[in-house]
Image (tube, grey):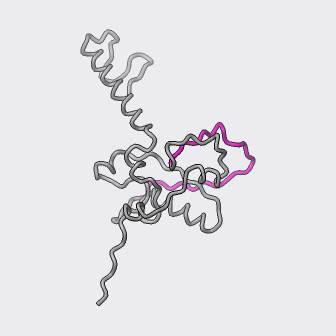
Amino acid sequence: MTEKAKPLTDLAIANAAVMKPILEIAENAGIPEEAVEQYGRYKAKIDVNKLPVTQSFGKVVLVTATSPTPAGEGKSTVTVGLADALSRLGEKSMIALREPSLGPVMGMKGGAAGGGYAQVLPMEEINLHFNGDIHAITTANNALSALIDNHIHQGNTLGLTQEGSLGNVHLI
């Protein structure tokens, strides 16, 4: 009897992949280098104000509200797999994924980077901090919360309420 080979894990597939530099990917997509704000060799933000104006329009496919399978295939895997399939058919394709929550770090959910052979890399960086925006927002939120708590503790001269509003000013 022959023993069936175990499928590779997402991490094993990711570690075996050879990543292309983000500038090469941007060039292939027609994005000028001056519109690319690099976050290392493999990640970047795109400044839409520096993209060339074009009269051609593409098509948008929105992948949303997909319940993951028991194996973990969900929205990100479907999105990446769809872009890969379109590319193999000779179509130009581009995807946009949101920055994942901290769920993957806590082992509570998938990583919003796809899975199997339909992954976005570098998976570990995407799941931990991507480009630092979420960390900056979290830090700012925590600082504001501490300032508000301290203000209330010191006498609440602004009259902040538990409902979170002060006239036209609304607190998050």
Q: Main secondary structure of the magenta part?
A: loop
- The percent coordinates of residue 142 (x first, y second) are 33, 28
Say whether residue 52 is magenta. Answer: yes
Q: Quadrant of the C terminus?
A: top left
- The percent coordinates of residue 4 (x first, y second) are 33, 81
Q: At x 53% / y 50%, what residue is drawn?
A: 96
Location of residue 143 with respect to 87 vertically, above or below: above
- The percent coordinates of residue 106 (x first, y second) are 28, 48
In this view, which residue lies farthest toward the bottom?
1
In this view, which residue lies farthest toward the right?
55
Number of residue marks: 0
Residue 3: quadrant of the picture: bottom left
Residue range corresponding to the magenta coloring: 43-66
Residue nearer the viewer, 46 or 34? 34
Say whether residue 48 is magenta. Answer: yes
Q: Quadrant of the N terminus?
A: bottom left
In this view, which residue lies farthest toward the left?
153
Q: At x 49% / y 50%, what residue is drawn?
A: 97
Residue nearer the viewer, 7 or 161? 7
- The percent coordinates of residue 21 (x first, y second) are 55, 52
Location of residue 12 with respect to 126 vertically, above or below: below
Residue nearer the viewer, 71 or 18? 18
> Is 44 on the left or on the right of 166, as rendered?
right
Residue 61: quadrant of the picture: bottom right
